[in-house]
């Protein structure tokens, strides 16, 4: 099942197998598209607190592996405003029963730790490959756009120096594409107001009044009780007046 929305084809597979076949076709044909994560393939994202910011991520992976917890990757989280590492580690793994046990881990090495679920960002999801919204870069094979300069290359390949101004790939403004105040960010888009007067409704009114005459409900046949009362009224002289000839 598919439909055209905003000049783009949206396909809605009915089964998981159909979803994967379409993904494979898109990949082989190198079509520009993006897709979404299947429910059973969604990742488990957790945050470890209690370790120093310079702790070796490989040691974290090894320690979790000894508990039969298999992370796909572990990264130290950064404070973007201060551009420094924080004593927080993001652990991404598959959503399996074994990996769910990470919430019960209380120590790594000689450190006492606390494992929490990653708080969801209030901002809409943004792809850091094409810089568009509502999908993830892991499921995108669209033409890359740089987050810093807006040109057609991956952000990691950008040669822009810190002195030159940034350029947004979405609105051409002088800011990075992930700037929360970008006018193209869906969170900043104002919903369009409905028209105060519907022109088509006004044009349709004359036709509605004409058709309503034909569609008026038919008169119900009179009941025997009503006919009896009419007959009684006639017998006592309540005849309707007749026009003189």
Image: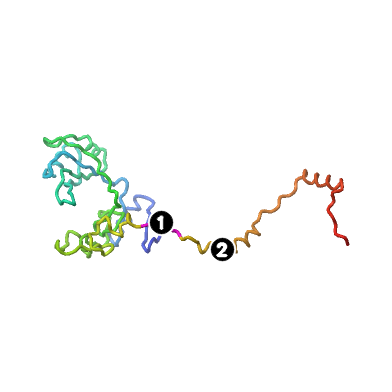
Q: Is residue 52 left or right of residue 27?
A: left
**x and y percent of residue 173 in the render?**
25, 63
Q: Tell us which disc is closer to us: 1 or 2.
A: 2
**x and y percent of residue 202 in the render?**
54, 63
Q: Nearer the viewer, residue 108 or 173?
A: 173
Which residue sits at x=75%, y=48%?
222
Q: Earlier in the sequence, mark 1 or mark 2?
A: 1
**x and y percent of residue 132 in the render?**
29, 58
Residue 216 sits in quarter: bottom right
Rendered view: 109 above or below 130:
above
**x and y percent of residue 124 in the render?**
30, 52
Which residue sits at x=14%, y=63%?
163
Which residue sits at x=23%, y=42%?
46
Q: Secondary structure at mark 2?
A: helix
Rounded to the nearest angstrom, the CA distance separating label 1 from label 2 is 34 Å
Q: Does residue 89 show up magenta in the picture?
A: no
Question: Which image quarter is the N terminus in?
Answer: bottom left
Q: Nearer the viewer, residue 34 or 155?
A: 155
Query: What is the number of the mark on residue 1?
Result: 1
Q: Secondary structure at mark 1?
A: loop
Q: Which residue is mark 2?
A: 204
Q: Residues within 10 Å of mark 1 (few under 14, many from 20)?
A: few
Residue 138 sits in quarter: bottom left
Q: Residues within 10 Å of mark 2 (few under 14, many from 20)?
A: few
Magenta segment's dominant SS is: loop
Which residue sits at x=34%, y=51%?
17
What range of the chain is rendered magenta? 190-194
Question: Which image quarter is the C terminus in?
Answer: bottom right
Rendered view: 232 above or below 187:
above
Query: What is the number of the mark on residue 46?
Result: none
């Amino acid at each position: 099942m598919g439909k055209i929305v905003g000049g783009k084809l949206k396909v809605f597979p009915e089964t998981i197998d159909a979803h994967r076949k379409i993904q494979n076709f898109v990949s082989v044909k190198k079509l520009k598209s993006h897709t979404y994560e299947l429910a059973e393939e969604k990742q488990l994202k957790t945050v470890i607190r209690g370790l120093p910011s310079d702790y070796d991520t490989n040691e974290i992976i090894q320690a979790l592996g000894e508990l039969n917890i298999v992370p796909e990757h572990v990264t130290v989280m950064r404070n973007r405003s201060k551009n420094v590492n924080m004593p927080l580690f993001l652990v991404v793994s598959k959503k399996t029963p074994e990996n769910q046990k990470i919430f019960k881990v209380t120590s790594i090495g000689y450190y006492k730790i606390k494992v929490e679920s990653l708080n969801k960002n209030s901002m809409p999801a943004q792809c850091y490959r094409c810089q568009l919204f509502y999908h993830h870069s892991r499921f995108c094979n669209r033409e890359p756009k740089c987050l810093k300069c807006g040109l057609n290359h991956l952000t990691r390949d950008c040669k822009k120096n810190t002195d030159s101004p940034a350029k947004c790939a979405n609105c051409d403004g002088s800011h990075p594409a992930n700037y929360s105040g970008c006018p193209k960010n869906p969170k900043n888009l104002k919903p369009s107001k409905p028209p105060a007067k519907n022109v088509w409704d006004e044009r349709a009114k004359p036709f509605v009044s004409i058709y309503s005459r034909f569609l008026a409900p038919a008169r119900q046949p009179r009941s025997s009780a009503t006919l009896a009362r009419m007959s009684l009224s006639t017998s006592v002289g309540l005849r309707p007046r007749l026009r003189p000839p």
